[in-house]
Amino acid sequence: MHSRDLRQKFLDFFHKRGHAIIPSASLVPENDPSILFTTAGMHPLVPNLLGERHPLGKRLVNVQKCLRTSDIESIGDESHLTFFEMLGYWSLGDYFKKESIHFTFDFYTQVLGFKKDDITVSVFGGSPKAPFDQESYDTWKNEIGIPEERIYKYGEEENWWGLASGIGPCGPDTEMFIDTGQPSCSPDCGPACSCGKFVEIGNNVFMEYLKNADGTIEKLPQKSVDVGLGLERLAMFSQNKTSVFETDLFSGVMEKIKKLVQTKDEITRPSRIIADHIRAAVFAIADGVFPSNTDRGYVVRRLIRRAIRYGHLLGLRGFTVSLGREFIRIMDSIYPELKEKENSILSHLESEERKFGETINRGLGEFEKIVSGVKSRGGEIICGSEAFLLFQSYGFPLEMTMELARENQLTVDQEGFKREFEKHQNLSRTATVGMFKGGLAETSEMTTKYHTATHLLLAALREVLGPEIYQKGSNITAERLRFDFNWSEKLSGEQIKKIEDLVNQKIGENLDVEMTELPREEALKRVKVSFDPAKYGEVVKVYNIGGFSIEVCGGPHVKNTKELGHFKIIKEESVGAGIRRIKAILERSPKS
Ligand code: SER
């Protein structure tokens, strides 16, 4: 089914069932300074989910433009996107779980022709916050007829939905997945697994609760349903494609890229990144967000410049305008603002590519020099002033330098970058206010917290499992930490709890994080290190967290553990023989 028909049939299906059609809101949220972009159809409806009457009634439906950068690392696979369209429908204090599950299922099977046998679901399994969602479970099992083995029960980390800030309307959800038929990656493989076997195609959230800023939870005066289905993924399955990039929403652009590229190398991932990022930029510019160094504009700049960098890898020059034009052609009948703003969109793409095109090669040359410098001094970290030079003189967004650094097994001192940035701002008295607001500051503040939390986690693992635990890998984003360590068995629930409790205990002890610089040999006598000592520089930084954790590390870290919030392990899995992986998050306060 062509995406145009899919949107229309979705709207018709719910309109026939009493839902009023509302237009897509702008990608720039109105009256909500807490978020940069609209990331779900429910954003503009928050007041109504909290109980305010909607002028069009209790049943609503729409197709909403959304932009999320949280999945940026996954772009390049079959199904992730930064910009996407969400097919959404809502009951505001009208019908609840049972009816909405039937609606979603009927739409999948009656309109899209999906088979019941291909659908796997998950429901909320219960937590201290709220009980197991028996009603959804029973509806799927007894009324729809999904067999028990395809109804997964998960906890809050998978089946609880609320706004990214964590504050506001929220509740348990039931999620729907298509089993692609790929073999399972492990005996534990299920819809929560990221191996690609299961692709999420929708989410019915039962908004029954309100989370307050102080972390307390209360019942909302009305029970609402917030449903979101990803248009691109539905198009992928209904068009019998194996990736969203092969659907009519992308195919024209993917063909264009293929024609432009001369190389015989594998181009799938870079071309998908380019297509995704240019599409997101086109829509953001149409909604009035222009590339810049502040807030939303910075996100758009990052997306365009990252696309240009991947274009360079494929030998492409001067390509963003023609791809932008193609996206406008694909989408303008649905989103007339694209046609209206075509000149502005294309001229912003053109100017961004011209500016960055002039400096990228020299910048990459400078980056190479920086890498040799860091490696020759035995270090692992690109310092703040080096990253700032790349930003200031060559237009490299910090995140791009971080990505390049990762490709070279290095990291970047983000705090140092921030300090340089602020210093420069003071000196030049230019008001580049807000750059750190939504983009970097948050990222940098959160990643700093996760760095410190990682130290506490390693120390707790040593305490609970034994002193022979070492770090085998670590990856930190603004959303979570990921930590690999040597251990061959699955951790029991009890062990996980002990580890979490210990980390939280240390956070609660308000321990100062102290840093001392020591000659390497001196430090190695006192500290157990996870890596080949030769990899460290002559002088190393030793971070000591109240004597509980002592590690050699480049930082950055928080000053006191009280800044961290509440530590929670959201996943524990195997990533190869003898190596386990933990994913954990920091919450503002414990979810009760
Ligand atoms: N708000 C929910 C989501 O984004 C359902 O639309 O998944």
Image (cartoon, grey):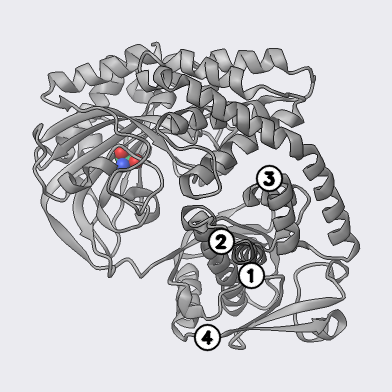
Residue 556's disc is 1
Q: Are marks 2 and 1 in contact (CB under 8 Å)?
A: yes
Mark positioned earlier in the residue sequence (2 or 1)? 2
Mark 4 near ligand 1 (CB under 8 Å)? no
Q: Amino acid at mark 4?
A: Leu
Q: Secondary structure at mark 3?
A: loop
Q: Is residue 89 visible?
A: yes
Q: Position of residue 447 (x, y in %)?
A: 56, 62
Question: What residue does disc 3 label?
Answer: 395
Q: Is residue 592 left or right of residue 470?
A: left
Q: Is residue 513 left or right of residue 566?
A: right
Q: Amino acid at mark 2?
A: Ser
Q: Are marks 4 and 2 in contact (CB under 8 Å)?
A: no
Mark positioned earlier in the residue sequence (1 or 4)? 4
Foreground pick, 66 / 89: 66
Give the foreground label among 3 and 2. 3
Q: Is residue 250 visible?
A: no
User: Label 3 vs label 1: CA separation?
Assistant: 23 Å
User: Label 2 vs label 1: CA separation?
Assistant: 9 Å
Q: Are marks 3 and 1 in contact (CB under 8 Å)?
A: no
Question: What residue does disc 2 label?
Answer: 444
User: Label 4 vs label 2: CA separation?
Assistant: 21 Å
Q: Position of residue 391 (x, y in %)?
A: 68, 51
Give the foreground label among 3 and 1. 3
